[in-house]
Image: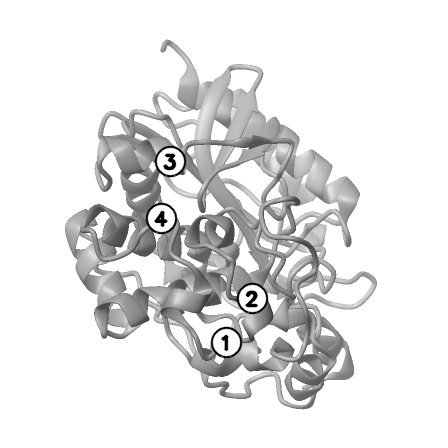
Amino acid sequence: MPTRVRRHRTGLSAAALGTLLAPAQAAGAGPAGAGTGGHPGHDERLQRQLERLVAQEDGPPGAIAVLTRDGRTQVYTAGVGDLATGRRPDLDDHMRVASIAKAYSGAVALRLVDRGLLSLDDTIGERLPALPPDWHAVTLRELLQHTSGLPDFSADPEFLRILQADPRHRFDPRTLLGFVADEPLLFRPGTLYEYSNSDNIAVALMAEAATGRRYEELLEELVYRPLGLRETSLPLGYRLPRPFLHGYDVSPPAEPEDVSEAIGASGVWASGGIVSTPRELGAFIRGYGGPALLSEATRKEQLTFRPGDSSEPAGPGTNAAGLAIYQYSTRCGVLHGHTGNFPGYTQLAATTPDGTRSLTFSINTQTSKGNKPALLARLRTVEEDFACALLKDR
């Protein structure tokens, strides 16, 4: 691996999935793909916004935004999804959804709550007694809302050393918390908010402990199958299913570097390893952020929000944290969803509370407040404009 790529590998962590970054360049800018600008029913102002995002100096090589309203889908693209071929982003391209994977583990856990196999008040001590005694009082609710105080394994020096030496290293995902097993909680559970990759690893392990089944099987039964997701998966290796949206590290004046398959996914697992497509990401968020998957009682708990606590990176508007989901209060109304970033990708998936409309917004480079704050600010502005288009006429 080139040195520059290795440096980015070490960022694949917590706050970090934001510091490793991949700011992209204008080389990826280009005309909109088929079904974008000029297509009947498309908003030319939104198309220009997307093209300007791609054309700016530190912009991504490509972008795809998908608006779905009551079963009708509009796809906006700009730039390219593969610099080598010039192919544009596509609705059925596979891509890393990054920390939106936390919403999938939330879906698994909350569906098990509905089935009476888990409780939001279940503790680590009750379900995972082999984990450090200092962690035993942490509840499932606190894990899902990032108020647990668990130290973040993905910021651990030994974890990062292994990853830097071999970005494609195959971790045993069920032992990831061992990297911080000798560390105390960062704060008393329930008192503070701290976004952490450790939380969703623990969520998946609690789901396995409650059912005696592998997390991957639970995803299939409780999430993929009910929502008709056939192109969504949780690979542990570094390869992506074909075709895929290529992700880039762009650090001008260097040429963009394709990092799509530079890092294995086993080191993020339930906290960031899901691969999906724009089409299926929209279907997932409509199901999870709307009423389709959960009972009314469980959904009420899911949608109890902590004002001011944001996803990473922050989504459009004002953010508030629920249980593995966020509230985005925009100037045009409220959406529920999740964001994520990973080397080569920055993602947003959001839905109206009734689950009838959704927005997915994907760019093929990484940005966060810690690494490209100006690009992130611009991205959030464009995302909010698309959110307003989604909410129009409601």
Q: Is residue 7 left or right of residue 233?
A: right
Q: Amino acid at mark 3?
A: Glu
Quadrant of the snapshot with the N terminus: bottom right
Q: Mark number for residue 301?
A: 3
Of the two numbered discs 1 and 4 on the same chain, state the one appearing first in sequence. Answer: 1
The residue under the point 63% across, 34% down is: 380
The residue under the point 70% across, 68% down is: 11
Q: Amino acid at mark 1?
A: Leu
**What distance separates the C-alpha of mark 4 from that of mark 2?**
33 Å
Q: Nearer the viewer, mark 4 or mark 2?
A: 2
Query: How busy is the neighbourhood of tag 3: few (under 14 within 10 Å), some, or many (20 plus)?
Result: some
Quarter occupied by residue 275? bottom left
Of the two numbered discs 3 and 2 on the same chain, state the one appearing first in sequence. Answer: 2
Secondary element type, mark 2: helix
Residue at image mark 4 = 281
Of the two numbered discs 3 and 4 on the same chain, state the one appearing first in sequence. Answer: 4
Q: Nearer the viewer, residue 267 or 387?
A: 267
Query: Whole-percent x and y of residue 353?
Result: 35, 26
Query: Whole-percent x and y of residue 313?
Result: 63, 46
Q: Mark number for residue 47?
A: none
